[in-house]
Amino acid sequence: MTKKGQNGKIGNLLVIVGPTAVGKTDHSLSLAMDFDGEIVSADSRLFYEGMDIGTAKPSIAERTAVPHYLIDICKPDQTLTLGEYQRLAYRTIEEILDRGRLPILVGGTGQYVMAVVEGWGIPEIAPYPELRRQLERLGPKELARWLNELDPLAAQRIDPRNMRRVVRALEVCLISGRPITDLQEKTPPPYNIHIIGLYRDRESLYQRIDRRVDAMIGGGLVEEVEALRDQGYRAYLPSMSGLGYRQILTYLRGEMSLSEAVDRIKFETHRFARQQDTWFRKDDPRITWFDLQEPYPQKNIFAQVESWLSD
C-alpha cells in the first residue's frame, strides 16, 4: 500500500480531530483551500443518506467548494463495519494522492480516525445476528464479566457501558476461538501523518452545541426524523438511535415534549463531546493541539501545516 507523491516522497496525510461542534468543518475547509486538499470524512454519523440536519453534515455548497468523501455512502438501515470503512478510507486517500492533492482526514469518531492512522487489524468476522441477540439478553454486567474472563485486555479497553463494542468483542472471540485483541495487531500505514487537534473550553463548546441544536430544530430536524420514520426506518437501527434522532423519535411518540427533547439532545451532546475529548486527549503526544479561543488560531494552524509540509 506504500504510496509516494509526484516528488517521490511518501504521501502526506493531514488529520483533524476534536469534539463535535468545535469547528472542524470550517477549519478543514479553509486548510483544504489553502493547501489544495480534499476531505475524507471520519465521522460515522455522516455515512447515512437523508440524515443531514441532525448530523450537521457539510452543506452541498461546502462539498462543491472542496471535494468530500465517505459521506452519504449507505442507507440508514445498512451497516458499514469499521473494517469496510478502513478499506474505503485507504482507497480514497490513495486516489487523492494519485491526483497530487493533500488528503485531509476529518472527524470526531475516534475509532474511525485511529483505525486509519494506526492501521488497526480488524477481525474479518461477519456479524452473527442470532448470537448478538442472545448476548444482549445477558445484560451489561454479565457481558462485562464474561468479556473479562475471555479477553481481559479487551475488557480493560472497552467501556462496559458500550454494549455494542462489548457484544462485538464477545462475538469475535466466540466465533474465532481467539480474543479480539489477538486479531487487532496494528500495521501503521506508510504515510507521513500529521494530526491537528481543535479544542475550546467546556463553557464555550457547550454554548456552540446548544446553538447548533437550536439551529437544527429551526432548520427542520423534526421534519427530517418524521420523514425517515415514514420511510420505515425504526428506532432500533443504529443510525436512528444517534444523538438527536433518538430524542426526536421519543417526542414523536408522545413520550416527552419538544422542549424536553431539545434539552435532552443538548445534555447528551455535552456528554458525548466530553467523551470525544477524553478519547483524543489520551493521544496527546501525537496530536498538535490548537485552542480556537486564542488569537488568530487559523493563522497559527496554517503556519503549522505549512511547516510540516515543507519538512
Image (cartoon, helix red, strand yellow):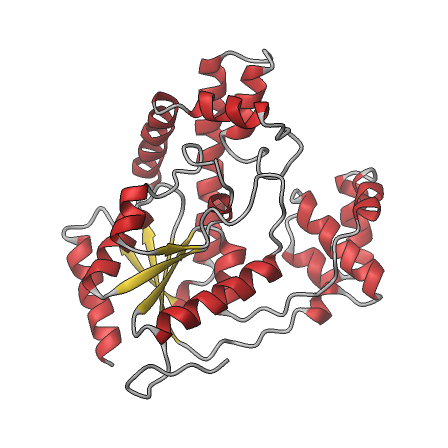
Residue 293 % position (x, y): 22, 46
Residue 167, relative to residue 304: is it above or below? Answer: above
Q: Residue at x 59, y 33 (%)?
A: 241
> Which corner quadrant of the image does residue 219 belong to?
top left
The answer, for residue 237, to whether it is visible in the render is yes
Q: Nearer the viewer, residue 101 or 272?
A: 101
Q: Nearer the viewer, residue 148 or 107?
A: 107
Q: Residue at x 34, y 31 (%)?
A: 212
Residue 153 % position (x, y): 70, 63
Q: Is residue 295 left or right of residue 209?
A: left
The answer, for residue 160, to whether it is visible in the render is no
Q: Residue at x 31, y 34 (%)?
A: 208
Quadrant that contains the C terminus: bottom left
Q: Nearer the viewer, residue 259 or 154?
A: 259
Residue 299 % position (x, y): 15, 58
Residue 108, relative to residue 161: is it above or below? Answer: below
Residue 247 % position (x, y): 54, 24
Q: Is residue 111 left or right of residue 298?
A: right
Q: Nearer the viewer, residue 146 or 72?
A: 72
Q: Residue at x 52, y 21 (%)?
A: 226
